[in-house]
Image (cartoon, rainbow, N blue to C red):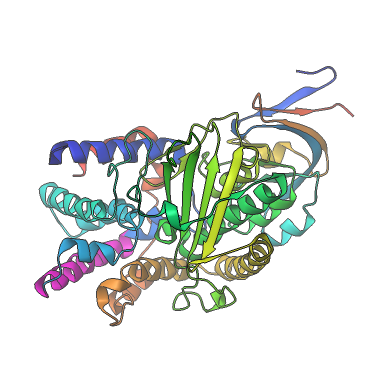
Amino acid sequence: MENQNELIEHFKQAIGEIWIKDGQSTWPIDLNSVAHLFMGIFVTELLEDIRRLKSKGQDDPAIAARFKTPARILRLIMPCVPGMKTCGMPPGTIRENVLYILSLAKHLKYGDLTNRGGKNIVLAPGTWEDRITMVTADKSSSLAVHKLCAILWNYAECLFFRAHGFAREFHGPYHFPDKKEEILVRDFIELKPLELWKSSHPVEYETIRIVTSYRDVGMSIDIYDNVTINADTTYVNSLESYYIEADGKMLNLEEVNRLCTVLSGVMLNISSEVEMLAWRRLAKRYAEIFWYSKKELKDGGDWHPPGTVDERIEKGELNTRLQALTPQALQRMLRISF
Amino acid sequence: MRDNHYVIATGTVVSPGQVTGPVKVVKNSADIKKIGPGDIMVVSQSSPAFAIGVMNASGLICEKGGIMTHICIVAKELGIPCMTQVKDAVELLQENSIITLDALEGIIHGKPE
């Protein structure tokens, strides 16, 4: 079992690898340019929420379960690190907090925490396979299944911007007993966050699970559950079988196609709405998204950002320093920040 | 390079395949309506709504963004030939001009008029 130093090093290595291949994603605004306006307040409140739950007798597994998926916890860490620096925390304290948050994610995962070996194993063997019925795929059904996957990906980004990890967890590759196929599970949650986006109301479902079985794709999944397959293969041509359920109910292809139309419509409406917003409104939206991601820690209380967030955004300016950093400088920052 | 064809640009292959078709440059959500089967969609930066355009397109070229950019992931999910990090793609690729996106070799070809 890895010790704390090894865990931190494995985490940093996993994040560094993502930063190399991820490229800059700035829709609808670069998170790095606005995070300094609210992440210090966010992380202070996050740690306080956890302390409060612990003082009420909640243990770590129960607190972790409130986040629903490990991705949701793991993707919080790196945005929180500069927030902790803003609050004046020394590197040792930041490191302790990172280790604690990592330990929470561990409660929601069966396999290696940092996905060493390219595997994101969330589900324990024997706990889920028996309750699904895989359907044999053909070219037409494969296209329909992957169209839904593609739309949901972008729908998640539309709802949660760069923090789309709050709405999805891709895990695997799993293997059914005595089978060689690689099984990928794409879980989407929070598909109807009406408190954030009223216009998401046409979407009937809160959660969708897509289970797909591929042959010879060489699947690998990184710590942010980005999936890669061999460069010369495609998902569409490699699908053997699939299973799709929404809120626990199995969906047929007719329903999948109808759902794609609904999701596309909502996505167009929300992205049009977002693209009209000036940067301060976008920063407030980003803050709301982060606070929404921890609303389950509030036990039904008000989850919204405090008024100080609005004030800081109104008085603040964009930070352009991080965009100017080279990949090498970003890697160095990662090494020394905690 | 094939006979009579010249290299317009190169880039990073996201989703393998080869397609020839007209260039359609997409700059905003309204532009996705012009994308039809056979078209090669060209974007500078990604927006979630652009995914709807990719679903109708036969190829995708991105000027910026890594292989994990969402619009690239859409192309990969659907098995549509796609390249990213194609420098100055929006400037180099003229609307409606016929090009070959060779997402096997990482090259975009044009044919002289």
| Residue A173 position within the rendered picture, expressed as x and y whole percent measured from the top left | 43, 41
Q: Which residues, given as a range, are shown in magenta?
A: A36-56
A126 lies left or right of B50: left
| Residue B54 position within the rendered picture, expressed as x and y whole percent measured from the top left | 68, 50
Quadrant of the image containing the C terminus of chain A: top left
| Residue B104 position within the rendered picture, expressed as x and y whole percent measured from the top left | 66, 26
Quadrant of the image containing the N terminus of chain A: top left
* Residue B29 is at least partly visible in this image: yes
What residue occupies the far bottom of the structure in this picture? A301
Dominant SS type (magenta): helix
* Residue A158 is at least partly visible in this image: no
Question: What residue sits 22% from the left and 51% below the top?
Answer: A102
A47 falls in the magenta region? yes
Please name whichever residue, A67 or A61, is drawn nearer the observer in this view of the structure: A61
Image quarter of residue A15: top left
Image quarter of residue A58: bottom left
Please name whichever residue, A65 or B88, is drawn nearer the observer in this view of the structure: A65
Tell me if residue B40 comes above or below residue A26 in the rendering.
Answer: above
A61 lies left or right of A210: left
Tell me if residue B4 comes above or below residue A38 in the rendering.
Answer: above
Question: What residue sits 21% from the left and 55% below the top?
Answer: A101
Question: What residue sits 53% from the left and 69% below the top?
Answer: A277
